[in-house]
Amino acid sequence: MATPVMDKVEAESAASPYITVTFRVRRFNPEISAEAIWEDFQLEIDPKERVLDGLHKIKWELDGTLTFRRSCAHGICGSDAMRINGKNRLACKTLIKDINPEKPITVEPIKGLTVLKDLVVDMEPFFQAYRDVMPFLITKDTNEPTRERFQTAEDRERFDDTTKCILCAACTSSCPVFWNDGQYFGPAAIVNAHRFIFDSRDEAGEQRLEILNDKDGVWRCRTTFNCTDACPRGIEVTKAIAEVKKALITRRF
């Protein structure tokens, strides 16, 4: 009995992991136009690759003017946060096969912050809110400690979740309140305040609570859970905000 022989073209097609994908990227260059446009790029790419790999392919092979931020490419630096198919994600953690590559993959900058060029936004307002909540350990003793500041495992667990923040702004730029009013501190700033408010070694919890008690502070949150859904690190952002609200009411933390 003869052994079936696969046609050479069919064999090559079956062996190739590549598929054709359309990247629909929102482009903006203030030196050319005040209006943003959508531009399509067709790529041959392995669906197991990441959206960041697709953007690299566009920039390196098709259009070197495409502008976006990225650094570590491993979900740690948080610099490549962007809206992919309408949701805030890290491009380096989003696999093409997981976002329906049969349809155009839309890529645009995160919302609520001024777009500087293409996928790059002005992060200064975001980082200013972060600085305003004093995201560092504060103690009344100004002298250097003579020994380690000990802490129980239970005390450390109290704020463990909010230590995971990588300042990608995915949570803050997914917040409808922040979209409408950039003066709101936003979820990321509150998360980083939470990290120190509930740290048993810190002594500036009251100061941070007063900062967040401002009209642009924690009470602006409408508990939509957008921030929790957007967080690439799985932080329970809405829960942390609720705990800060409770601490403001009870003054217990």
Image (spheres, helix red, strand yellow):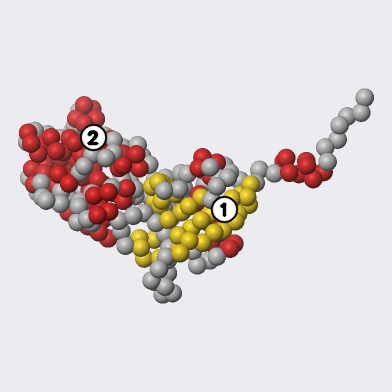
Q: Which residue sits furthest bottom?
A: 31
Secondary structure beneath disc 1?
Answer: strand
Q: Nearer the viewer, residue 5 or 28?
A: 28
Say whether disc 2 or disc 1 marks the residue closer to the N-terminus. Answer: 1
Q: Position of residue 162 (x, y in %)?
A: 26, 39
Type of amino acid under label 2: Lys
Residue 208 appears in the figure: no
Report the side of 107 relative to 244 (left or right).
right
Comparing 203 with 102, the one in front is: 102
Q: Which residue is mark 1?
A: 22
In the rendered structure, the answer to whether residue 21 lies left or right of residue 198 reads: right
Asked if residue 212 shows in the view, the reply is yes
Question: Relative to 62, is 204 on the left or the right?
Answer: left
Where residue 122 appears, as percent x and y from the top left, is: 32, 62
Q: CA distance from mark 2 to mark 1?
A: 38 Å
- Which residue is disc 2 drawn over? 239
The single residue placed furthest to the right in the displayed view is: 1
Where does residue 24 sit, x and y in percent of width and height? 51, 56
Left or right, 9 with reference to 54? right
What amino acid does circle 1 point to?
Answer: Thr
Q: Residue at x 22, y 37 (%)?
A: 240
